[in-house]
Amino acid sequence: MAFIIRAQNVSFCYSEGESKSPPVLKDINLQFEKGEFIGIIGHNGSGKSTLAKHFNALLLPTKGNVYVKDMDTKDAKHLWDIRQTAGLVFQNPDNQIVAAIVEEDVAFGPENLGIPPEEIRKRVEYALKAVGMWEYKDFPPHMLSGGQKQRVAIAGIIAMKPECIVLDEPTAMLDPIGRREVISTIKKLNKEEGITVILITHFMEEVVDADRVIVMDDGKVVLDGTPKEVFKEVEVLKKIGLDVPQVTELAHQLRKEGIDIPSDILTIEEMVEFICR
């Protein structure tokens, strides 16, 4: 089996030596297959954003190794290849937008890779169409909504043709409409373009359609499975300070009242279908 990203016995401290800080990551072992849609959830301080930065070598493990397509992130000669393979989208799109026009911003990454101009034009058009922003190509980014800015930031990564996109809480600063726009774009890229997606979030509803959900707490992986497998562990999730999707919570409460209802219901549609039966 070919894994696009592997983390082997990864631990990480932000400072070492005499002023050594407590480990933020503790002996993480994970493997991601090409084309997977993975959700990583956890409360603030659980280590999920720190882990995300390891997937494209923004941070390097204190102990253990991270491999991106079998390239060790600690090997400096692979740095550009790793960052072309795994692109990182940050929480605040304003931190990633660098140009005065949308089209120029999306072209920035490929230009820095030395891509020929004709190929850059093709990539920019492809990327903006992929996120539904082609009609805004001549707009100044500051004229866009938060959700539109985040889609432009994602397009800037897509234009570099990564095989994997790591999104670090990309909807945290958006309103519900912007969140829906961005999540819809992410799902489309995964299903239609075959791009591996690793979505770090604290909104449970955003990962109910993922292939796999990983739950982190105190720098460790505490749950790893399909959304149905993970979210039926309601008590475990609540114990570490996480919510579950509202429909799952409703099913959990009904079961506590003695009603025979599946514990792995995730969506309103599944609840309606069960009740109608």
Image: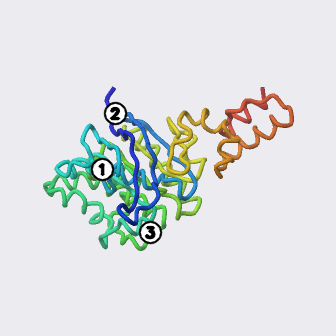
Q: Quadrant of residue 264?
A: top right
- Residue extending furthest right? 257
Q: Quadrant of residue 267?
A: top right
Q: Which quadrant of the rendered structure holds the N terminus?
A: top left
95 and 41: which one is in front? 41
Q: Disc 3 versus disc 1: distance between alpha carbons?
A: 20 Å
Nearest to N terminus: mark 3 or mark 1: 1
Q: Position of residue 149 (x, y in %)?
A: 42, 64
* Vertical side of 94 occupied by 41: above or below: above
On residue 241, the disc is: none
Q: Disc 1 versus disc 2: distance between alpha carbons?
A: 26 Å
Nearest to N terminus: mark 1 or mark 2: 2
The residue identified by callout 1 is: 126
Q: Nearer the viewer, mark 1 or mark 2?
A: 2
On residue 144, the disc is: 3
Q: Disc 3 versus disc 2: distance between alpha carbons?
A: 37 Å
Label 3 sits on what residue type?
Answer: Leu
SS class of the residue under badge 1?
helix
Residue drawn at (48%, 61%), measured in percent from left and top?
Answer: 147
Label 1 sits on what residue type?
Answer: Tyr
SS class of the residue under badge 3?
loop
Label 2 sits on what residue type?
Answer: Phe
Badge 1 density bin: few <14, some 14–19, many ≥20, Cα 10 Å:
some
The residue identified by callout 2 is: 3
269 left or right of 187?
right
Nearest to N terminus: mark 3 or mark 2: 2
61 left or right of 50?
left
SS class of the residue under badge 2?
strand
- Residue extending furthest front? 18
